[in-house]
Amino acid sequence: MEAYTLKKPESIKRRKRVGRGPGSGHGKTCCRGQDGQGSRSGYSRRPWFEGGQMPLQRRVPKRGFNNLFKKEFQIVNIEQISKLKESEIDPALMKKSGIINDADKAIKILGNGEIKNSKKVIADVFSKSAQEKLIAAGGSVEIREKIQPSKKDK
């Protein structure tokens, strides 16, 4: 007999024998209490049952959440800008070429891709890498000024 042939002994704990008289401590109601569903044979509760408390799936609001202060941007990559032939790229040109859907909504320029020729880009926000790539190529970056809506528009 070697050490690697030894096995852990199986559990020798005996099962609880209920209903064997008052002397056993598990007689009469057999640890099930007095009355109710839980005292009957065949009873099994659902895993998500919370004992009469309002269940979690009914307590949680179902309407979702909309952040009122979220800023939505139309994303444009340097790679898309480098494909355009013009030297000055503004929101109107981006919409005309199909890069963005709406020239009035905020535009963010990201630094994915490479750019070789100099271009002047007008947008609302630039990532740090996009700004560096545009300036390194000899171009320039211009942040578009927001047009404040009048009180009638609100």
Image (tube, rainbow, N blue to C red):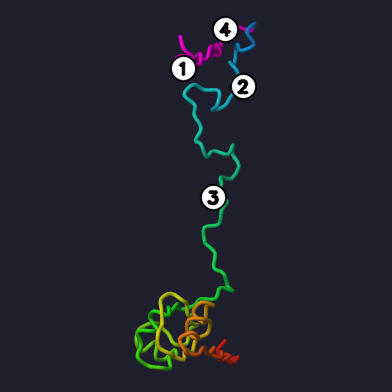
Instruction: Name the N-terminal-most of marks 1 and 4.
Output: 1
**Residue 128 in the image, given as x and y percentages of width and height:** 54, 77
**Residue 53 in the image, given as x and y percentages of width and height:** 60, 42
Circle number at residue 4: 1
Q: On screen, 65 above or below 105?
A: above
Q: Amino acid at mark 1?
A: Tyr
Question: How much space separates mark 2 and mark 1, taking CA atoms?
Answer: 48 Å
Q: Amino acid at mark 2?
A: Gly
Mark 2: few/some/many CA within 10 Å (<14, 14-19, 20+): few
Secondary structure under the numbered disc 3 in the rendered image: helix
According to the image, label 3 marks what residue? Answer: 58
Question: How much space separates mark 1 and mark 4, taking CA atoms?
Answer: 43 Å
- Foreground pick, 17 / 38: 17
- Foreground pick, 139 / 37: 139
Question: How much space separates mark 2 and mark 3, taking CA atoms?
Answer: 29 Å
The residue range painted magenta reads: 1-22
**Residue 123 in the image, given as x and y percentages of width and height:** 49, 86
Principal secondary structure, stretch drawn in magenta: loop
Q: Residue at x 54, y 50 (%)?
A: 58
The question of residue 81 being in magenta is answered with no
Marks 1 and 4 in Cβ contact (< 8 Å): no
Mark nearer the viewer, 1 or 4: 1
Q: Amino acid at mark 3?
A: Arg
- Foreground pick, 129 / 122: 129
According to the image, label 4 marks what residue? Answer: 20
The question of residue 4 being in magenta is answered with yes
Instruction: Name the N-terminal-most of marks 3 and 4.
Output: 4
Instruction: Name the N-terminal-most of marks 2 and 3.
Output: 2
Secondary structure under the numbered disc 1 in the rendered image: helix
Q: Amino acid at mark 4?
A: Arg
Circle number at residue 33: 2
